[in-house]
Amino acid sequence: MSKGVQIAIAAVTVFAAVAIGLTQMDGEDGTFTYYSSVGDFVGDGAPESSAGVARVHGFVVAGSIQADLPAGHVDFSIKDAENPGLLSVRFLGIDVPDLFRDGAEVVIEGRFERGTFLAERVMAKCPSKYENQEPGTEA
Amino acid sequence: MLVAVGNYSLYLMLGFCIYALVAALIGANPEREAWLRSSERAVYAVFALCCLAMLGVEVALVTDRFDLAFVAKTSAREQPLLFKLALWGGQAGSLLLWAWLLSLFSFLVVLQNRQRNRMLMPWVIASMMLNLLFFGAIVTFSSNPFEALPAAKAYSNGAGMNPLLQHAAMLVHPPVLYIGFIGFSVPFSFAAAAMITGQLGTTWFETTRRWTLVSWFFLGMGLMIGGRWAYEVLGWGGYWAWDPVENASLMPWLAATAFLHSVIIQEKRGMLKIWNVALIGLTYSLCVFGTFLTRSGVVQSVHSFANAGWFGTLFLAYVAVLAIGFAALLIWRLPLLRSHNKLNSIVSREASFLLNNYVFIGLLAIVFFGTLYPVFSESLTGVRTQIGPPFFQRYSGPLAIFMLFLTGVGPLIAWRRATWINLRKSFLWPAVITLATVVGTLAVGVREFYPVSFLALCAWVIATIVEEYQRGIRARRRRGENSLQAALGLIRRNQRRYGGYIVHLAIVLMFIGFAGASFNSEETRLLKPGETWEVSGYSLEYRQVRPVRHAHYAGAVARLALKDQGKPVGVLLPEKRMYFQQEQPTTIPAIASNLREDFYVILAGLQPDQSIAVKVYINPLVNWIWIGGFVLVFGNTILLWPFKRRGSGAGART
């Protein structure tokens, strides 16, 4: 078998896989997702409701977490590290990640309706990395 | 004292490392053999000094030396001894472990090759020492475990290891993974030496076959133990999240798996020489690159320890030197590496091996692209983009299916060119069984494309393996052996082939487990004490919740009685803890497990009136992944078992 045929087989194999993958893409499902910051999201001219699924990145405002277990949701607000502006969030679930707490860096995913972000998912970043702060130092 | 001993052993180690490197290069001249001997002794010294430094860190950890930054960060007075000893809970310690393993492996390689491979050894030593020099320098000058805290900050107790890491799997996972990563430095160094000396036959990989197999095995086990840890500890019901650092260890594993297959073609047919050298270069480069990803914080990940700028740059430069240097050697030696044999037919075993290689490299490319895409996109466009698990599943799914198919095809077709009659004979039964599985899964109501094809192809591979064993056993029984003798004889005679089938079987069992993830389901509910929840054929009765109080954490544990179709299974005790020092809550799931599915429950929240929020995951078939792991251990034991060569078949002792 010649070199050309070998290379052709290689190319066909890989591209067939990619093509099959592409046919199933629809963009809105987390394959590629763009983050926006709280500032971008609530900034001037932001609509009252958003179309489709959005992802916003921010920090949990200290003291804003209100869990309502019987109703099955958790309310909180997030903000950017520097810019002013708050986004109030209702997480439609109660199983927040372990690292979710005051000041935690989070990414929320969901839709924006009538001024509230209804989050289907809340992901907490790991600010502590797996290494702890030296005792006596501030984070 | 301890600090001085530790630091001086690190400095001395670097000194001997440089000496061993220089002496090896001088000793490469056959007339200066004495220098090579001297270099080998320097390697022993390097190992001894590394041991001393390791010992120093362990002593510091056990004696609670909280005046040292590393100890203060990763240990605490009340931390159990085993977790104190696990020095890989922090950056400095894990890099020292890396350096120590590299020195250990250098030492073993020198011991093994005192009389053999005299041409290659100077370059092997030089390459190993060059690698060690980098990690040694990092440990000495950048992430030094003996670095003291300023006196004002010295503390009476440490921060303690991250509670998430305080788990049995975490004691094993990092060292196991590291053995895999670093083990590949040996075949890598031999390949480099082979290129430098122009001895490009099969010696370099035959000498390092065991190193390659052992490293591959440890890397795979490391991945799996990591998955098991995530499953038991992180409380999200899964074992694999396509996290950048999970991917970082998957990538070298894929390259190494491709290598293990393609060296066979070089051995049997003298083909793919360039490819093999390139693959082993790629494998070790990816090992180091993976460590860089993990440690530098370039990619946002739960595994990142620290985020030091120049440390990352230095590390990346090292990976580049390694990969580019190796590639340069390869290009220089291209004329010597061209093979004379060609593929005779697309329907041959070597063609199936070649396809299998393309699939592995395709998977590798997908994982690589997906892992680094956020880095590229942020640096090019400034927009942070994330690639989620759907991306990886979409693209790797079809390739994985094709790979399973090849796993079944490969063993059944002949080298060079298969004949139609042969094909029909070998493929008849496996094909029938595959078809039956498709019909069967459709009949039980499974309609999704991926699970049906995965399960069918798993059946296909198992059928071909059984057929292969059966054929071999039948042939031996004709010589008067009983079935067991025949099976053992097969393995003994052709350990790599039949051991390899067991490894394939292990991988297939894991795939059955992966296929199960398509049927995962989850539900959340608030339960009052005494309330019973009927969920997916189970009934879960909430009895009570109890407070838990320990020295370093407090929390609550719920008692839940579980019945499966009315039959009592036992009491599940999911737990929620708050670690004081780290102010970190942890959710400890409770799992009731059988071969069909796992009932996985977490305590998601607690109300003042004692009602609890409970989240249940039903994860079908997940146990088959771990069972596959045990079969993998078995298969690898067969592959590595030191059978006596050319012994008489009769009276085999096992």
Image: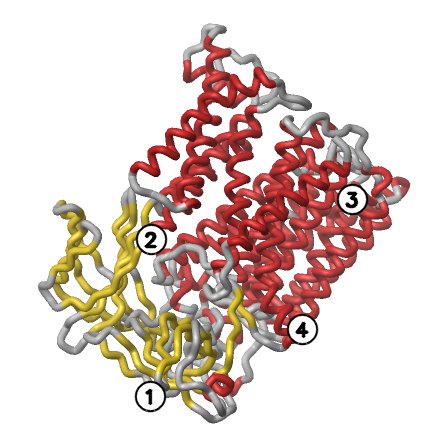
Image x and y of residue B596, in percent:
29, 42
| Residue at image location 45% in from the left, 74% down from the top | A54
Judged by depth in the image, the label closer to the viewer, 1 or 2, is 2
Query: Label 3 to label 4, Cα distance in Å?
Result: 38 Å
Q: Is residue B151 left or right of residue B518?
A: right
Are the residues at dot 2 and dot 3 in contact (C-beta closer than 8 Å)?
no
Q: Amino acid at mark 1?
A: Gly
For residue B471, above or below residue B210: above
Q: Amino acid at mark 4?
A: Leu
Judged by depth in the image, the label closer to the viewer, 1 or 3, is 1
Q: Is residue B321 left or right of residue B1?
A: right
Judged by depth in the image, the label closer to the viewer, 3 or 4, is 4
Image x and y of residue B217, in percent:
53, 42
Residue for badge 4 = B380
Could you say which disc has been placed on residue B520 in the image?
A: 2
Among the 4 quarters of the image, the one containing residue B28: top right
Q: Amino acid at mark 2?
A: Asn
Are the residues at dot 1 and dot 3 in contact (C-beta closer than 8 Å)?
no
Query: Label 2 to label 4, Cα distance in Å?
Result: 38 Å
Query: Label 1 to label 2, Cα distance in Å?
Result: 35 Å
Residue B58 visible to the viewer: no
> The residue tagged with tag 3: helix, strand or loop?
helix
Residue for badge 1 = A63
Assess disc 1: are there few (<14), some (14-19) or many (≥20) residues with their C-alpha within 10 Å of its C-alpha.
few
Could you say which disc has been placed on residue B193 in the image?
A: 3
> The residue tagged with tag 4: helix, strand or loop?
helix
